[in-house]
Image: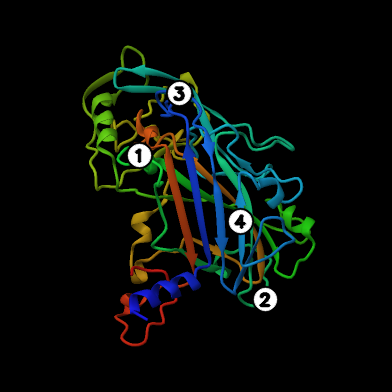
Amino acid sequence: MPKKNRGRINRIRHLIVMCTLSIVFLSISTYAWFIGMQTVHVSSFDVEISVTESLSLSLDGSTWDTTVSISKETLDASSYVGHTNSWGGDGLIPVSTVGEMDSNASRMKLFEKASLTATPGGYRLLASRIDNYGIDQPEQDGYVVFDLFIKNFSGSQYISELNELDEEAIYLTTDSKVEVGAAGVADTGIENSVRVAFAQIGRVIGTTTTAGTITGITCASEGDVTGICRTAQIWEPNDKDHNANAISWYNTSCLARTGADLTETTSYDGACQPFVDGTAYPTYAVKDEISSADHVDIYDGTAYNTYDHGWLEGAELLYAYPYFTDTMKLLTGTDRPQFMTLAPNSITKVRIYVYIEGQDIDNYEFSMIGKQIAVNFGFTKQRFIETDISYIGPDINEGAGPE
């Protein structure tokens, strides 16, 4: 068998988690954060996940296997009784988050546009929190979210205290990607505003067999449960890819801003900072509710209109979230960073969010014409691949690196 093919087989065999997501946007209405807020309808969203011998997966806390499948059509049948999973309802809308968790609700904090008015150099933004945090409150429409339970068989000791140094490193495979789907329209840039967030809620010892205990895991450390609820790890794919139309939109609508508010005394003069293809830029995501008194423009940030709201550290309304990017994913050797960690001999409840980031600079009026995106991601425990150490010998690739 050719070495290239053997490497592919080994990489598939040793994936920890492989997930394929397809989102078909049927509506042709505008979805851009700063122009409109119509619904982008969703159809045919499927998830297929597989693991190696060291992990087992479940969607209901009682049925464990090396593979699980879930879709919009099988959501209720695949999930546990009383779940709050959602396939987006009638469709997706742009939202924004910095991955902060609400420990009382065991949910990720999300914000949506409340209002938007054009300014001389951009658009004034008002944002409100999405109501997914009340007692017994379901997740709202507009984003995809589901619970995945991961049983890690590495080691026999379970350490109940929460300490990342006691946990095992997990890496995002280099073939993980978000792209326009087979039935989509290329060259619109819709894939560049997608985010996938992984929120670890809590965990129990891996020998737990009571389904109710597993599905009932929350952020609270009570009884046998170790609450986690650390800030979600969010993956930003295509961080250096920028569509020409998105660049043109930015250059046309953004002007440099000075002054403390959006009154007639505010000055907009000159071009904003450069925005070019092939360079990664920060996303100033919404960190808290924004009112008209806050005078926030969507282009606020030193990387764009040069204006910085963050003069008081910790009080930022827009925050440059440190995403895990495709650029980081492709680093080699000891430069390759871990994506997340899992405790040995544990069952961890992970709440996964798939959404459109409204504050992404690539989110412009016409990208919705792309209609369909495909999301594929995988995890591996192997940090190094053969090329990292100039390996010479039989093909024993247990990683998921470049072909």
Residue type (three-letter) at the residue carrying disc 2: Gln
- Where residue 213 sits, quadrant-wise, is bottom right
Which comes before the other along the chain, label 2 or label 1? Answer: 2
* x 34%, y 68%: residue: 402
Percent x, y for residue 251?
Answer: 23, 29
Task: State the separation of the CA atoms marked 2 and 4.
Answer: 30 Å
Picture quarter with the C terminus: bottom left
Q: Which residue is mark 2?
A: 157
Give whichever of discs 4 and 1 has the lower sequence position.
4
- Mark 3 or 4 closer to N-term? 4
* Camera-nearest label, 3 or 1: 1
Between residue 397 and residue 240, name the one nearer to us. 397
Can you tell which mark lies on residue 69? 4
Q: Amino acid at mark 3?
A: Asp
Mark 3 Cα within 10 Å, few/some/many (few <14, many 20+)?
Answer: some
Q: Amino acid at mark 4?
A: Ser
Label of residue 236 in the image: none
Dividing the picture into quarters, in which one does residue 373 lie?
Answer: top left
